[in-house]
Every structure is written in structure tokens, then in C-alpha cells.
């Protein structure tokens, strides 16, 4: 699968992190899995985001030049999206991964959200997805719940409100944390709850307040599941999605892992499908962009050679280093830094989105507590794109393109 251990204190350790889990609520953060090159075996990865930094990184002054007013309230950001998303247009977005800390004040949450919104607007983004962890007790467990790093619905309200005020299309995306799943063999895509009906009942109870927050804050999309390969096709999805739609009147989506997507039908009854897209392309580091595009199309052609207007790339990204094309989802490797590899990959993916008339792309990722304009440090993940000028320029160019989008969503 994929990605994402967003554990800020472990960001500099390219090793597997083992934790002892005694029950709910659970500790540590989201431990992603990625696929190795030429294999469908997942590997556990640690942090692909920089460690949390206190404040905004520039004192009380925000990145857009605004500051904190008396009483700790944050002033309205100066920057807003120039061309807000409209139905039928492309979603040009970024994934924000957020491990909340209960000690963080409302003022801190709002300040960081405004800083991230300002950065996204500067990239010409019109969309943002807020991904955050929730927890289980093990691969066979039927219990799902919020944990220490799961944002409260109230904090989520604040973040969604700030992003909405900036003119960004918002998506809410809970992700099952993998710390208790005995990685690397165990990941969210091969869980086997002993009682699937009980698992879905627990899942519905966990999701309910977050669906209500998404509804209050006018989110456009709620992702009902991410990379749950082994649970796809279960009849209980129908009842879960119906319950979600009673609480949330926006779009309910599902995000599939790339291998399952090209391998067959994703049997989850939603009208919109996201793909966490880490297709390996075995070309040289200096390969031209058109070779990367061709490599992507070889994978997508396994599904269809036609346009894909109902598909959004829910996650796309790659490390800025030599050899990354062979395993774009491998967060363990720490080869020589090569910003051009990352920039060319982003350029190629943007071309694929447009030529296939996809609904858009969300780049993985920015850690919520980071200072996005700071250049990545040597000890931080090669996967970071924030602070890498060549990649940022490709994002701006992509998001500022004349691509009109896929047009009205076809009737399923």
C-alpha cells in the first residue's frame, strides 16, 4: 500500500517503529505501509513529514504577514483562492496529515490552519484534504476508536472553517492507523475482524461526529474508507454509507490502493473513487517526462484506456532522490537527494491527470504542525515537497494550467 507514518518525533528515523498496544485509546501516530519495487508486499514506513515545530516558525506573525490580535485571536488571512473550485472543474489539492495534540489550544490550531491555507493558496491550490488517524487493537479486532492523536470534532471544525474561509474545497479523510497491526506483514489493507458486522457498527459510531463536523463546516467530500482492501465487497458498506449520507449531505467517497484499483473492481458502493497512486515506473533518474507519463499509462491501461472523469488521485507523490521512480511509495530508502526526480514526477502526473481527464490530484503531503515554507533538512524525509523550489514550481504550473477539468460527473 502506502504511506504514512506521521510521527513527528520519529521523523528522522528511517526504521520500523514497534509499539506495544494495550487497548483503546492507542498511542503513537499513523504507521503507513508502502509497496516495494516490483512487489505487492507492503513495508512499514516511518515519518514522511518534518517534526512538529512550535508556533508558526516566525513568532506571532503568520506567513501572510498577519498577526495575532489581543486575546490570542488570529486575524483573517490576507490570501484567498483566486479561482475557487466549481463542479466539473479540476481539484488541485494537497493532503494535510494531522496528528492532533490535546494540549494544543484552539488559538494554536487556528493559527497553524491559517499558515497552511496561506501556503496552499500560494501554490495555486483550490482544494485540501485533511487526513488524520484513528485506531484499532489489532488485525482481528472489531473495535475502532479515536486515540491520543485523533483530532477532536471541535478542532476539526476550526481547521475546516479556516480552509473554507480561504476558499479551499475541503475533504475529510480519517485513516486507520497501523501501529497495532503487526507491521510490516499487517497493514490496513489486510485486516480480518472476527465479526465484520461488529466492525462496521464500531466504525459507524466512530465516524458519526466527524461526519457531523464535515456537514457543519460545508466540506465537499467525506472519505468513508482508505485502502481497506480486505474489507472491500462487504455488504455492510451499504448501511454504513446510508448512515453517513444521513449525517453528511456532501459527496461520500472511497480511496483505493493503487494495486487493488488496477487489479479489478473496487466493490464499495460510492459514486466517487479516489486512488492512492504510487505506480512504479522502472526508468532512469534522467528519464524524460514523457517516459514517466508512458509508465503511468501502462498501469492505468490495465483498468481502461479511456478517460477517467470519475477518478481523483487522492494521493500522489515521490521522494526527491535517486532511484525513486522504481518505488515511489518506499519511504525507507534514503539515497542521494535529487530534486529533479521529484519535480519531473509531479510534472508527469499532472499531464496524466489532464490527458486522462481525471477529476484532479492531491499531493502527499504536508504535516499540519510543520512550517511549510522551510526548506527540508537532510535528516527529514526525501518525500517532502514543501520547501523544494523546483517541485513547488511544478505544482504552481500544474494548478495554474488551463485544464478545464473532467466536466460534469457522469451518471454511474
Image (cartoon, rainbow, N blue to C red):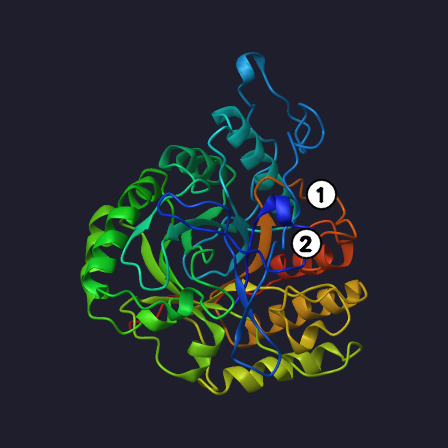
Nearer-N-terminus badge (2/1): 2
158 to 254, vertically: above or below: above
Q: What crowding class fits label 2: few (fewer than 14 Cα within 10 Å), some (14-19), or many (20 or more)?
A: some
Q: Check whether the beta carbons of the residues at disc 2 and disc 1 lie within 8 A of each other.
A: no
117 to 224, vertically: above or below: above
- Residue assigned mark 1: 373
> Could you tell me residue 387's position as x and y percent?
73, 49
**Residue at 25% of width from left, 66% of height from top?**
194
Of 202 and 248, nearer the camera is 202
Q: Secondary structure at mark 2?
A: loop
**Residue at 48% of width from left, 74% of height from top?**
258
Q: Secondary structure at mark 1?
A: loop
Q: Which one is in front in this view, the residue at disc 2 or the one at disc 1? A: 2
Q: Which mark is residue 13?
A: 2
Of 306 and 197, nearer the camera is 197
> Could you tell me residue 8's position as x and y percent?
61, 45
Of 287 and 328, nearer the camera is 328
> Could you tell me residue 171's position as x and y percent?
43, 51
Q: What crowding class fits label 1: few (fewer than 14 Cα within 10 Å), some (14-19), or many (20 or more)?
A: some
Of 131 and 378, nearer the camera is 378
Residue 204, visible in the rendered structure = yes
**Residue at 38% of width from left, 83% of height from top?**
264
Which residue occupies the extreme top position in the image? 70
To which quarter of the image does residue 36 belong? Answer: bottom right
Q: Marks 2 and 1, how far apart in space?
A: 22 Å
> Could you tell me residue 187's position as x and y percent?
45, 66
Amino acid at each position: 500500500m502506502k504511506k504514512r507514518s506521521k510521527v513527528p518525533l520519529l521523523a528522522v528515523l528511517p526504521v520500523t517503529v514497534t509499539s506495544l498496544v494495550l487497548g483503546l485509546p492507542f498511542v503513537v501516530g499513523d504507521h503507513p505501509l508502502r509497496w516495494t519495487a516490483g512487489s505487492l508486499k507492503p513495508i512499514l514506513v516511518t515519518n514522511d513529514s518534518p517534526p512538529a515545530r512550535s508556533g508558526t516558525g516566525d513568532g506571532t506573525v503568520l506567513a501572510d504577514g498577519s498577526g495575532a490580535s489581543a486575546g490570542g485571536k488570529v486575524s483573517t488571512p490576507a490570501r484567498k483562492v483566486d479561482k475557487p473550485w466549481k463542479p466539473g472543474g479540476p481539484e488541485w489539492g494537497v493532503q494535510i496529515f494531522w496528528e492532533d495534540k490535546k494540549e494544543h489550544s484552539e488559538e494554536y490550531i487556528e493559527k497553524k490552519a491559517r499558515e497552511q491555507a496561506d501556503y496552499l493558496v500560494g501554490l495555486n491550490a483550490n482544494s485540501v484534504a485533511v487526513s488524520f488517524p484513528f485506531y484499532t487493537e489489532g488485525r482481528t479486532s472489531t473495535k475502532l476508536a479515536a486515540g491520543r492523536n485523533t483530532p477532536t470534532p471541535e478542532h476539526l471544525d476550526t481547521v475546516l472553517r479556516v480552509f473554507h474561509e480561504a476558499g479551499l474545497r475541503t475533504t475529510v479523510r480519517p485513516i486507520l492507523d497501523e501501529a497495532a497491526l503487526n507491521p510490516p506483514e499487517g497493514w490496513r489493507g489486510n485486516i480480518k475482524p472476527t465479526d465484520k458486522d461488529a466492525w462496521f457498527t464500531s466504525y459507524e459510531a466512530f465516524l458519526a461526529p466527524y461526519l457531523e463536523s464535515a456537514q457543519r463546516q460545508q466540506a465537499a467530500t467525506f472519505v468513508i474508507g482508505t485502502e481497506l482492501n480486505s474489507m472491500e465487497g462487504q455488504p455492510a458498506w451499504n448501511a454504513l454509507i446510508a448512515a453517513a449520507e444521513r449525517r453528511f449531505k456532501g459527496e461520500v467517497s472511497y480511496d483505493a490502493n493503487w494495486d487493488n484499483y488496477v487489479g479489478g473492481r473496487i466493490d464499495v458502493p460510492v459514486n466517487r473513487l479516489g486512488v492512492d497512486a504510487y505506480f512504479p515506473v522502472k526508468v532512469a533518474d534522467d528519464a524524460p517526462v514523457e517516459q514517466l507519463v508512458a509508465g503511468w499509462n501502462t498501469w492505468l491501461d490495465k483498468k481502461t484506456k479511456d478517460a477517467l472523469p470519475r477518478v481523483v488521485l487522492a494521493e500522489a507523490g515521490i521522494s526527491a532522490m535517486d532511484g525513486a521512480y522504481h518505488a515511489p511509495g518506499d519511504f525507507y530508502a534514503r539515497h542521494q537527494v535529487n530534486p529533479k526526480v521529484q519535480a519531473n514526477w509531479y510534472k508527469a502526473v499532472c499531464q496524466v491527470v489532464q490527458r486522462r481527464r481525471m477529476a484532479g490530484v492531491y499531493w502527499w503531503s504536508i504535516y499540519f504542525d510543520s512550517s511549510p515554507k522551510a526548506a527540508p533538512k537532510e535528516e527529514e524525509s526525501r518525500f517532502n515537497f514543501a520547501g523544494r523550489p523546483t517541485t513547488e514550481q511544478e505544482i504552481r504550473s500544474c494548478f495554474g494550467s488551463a485544464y478545464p477539468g473532467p466536466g460534469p460527473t457522469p451518471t454511474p
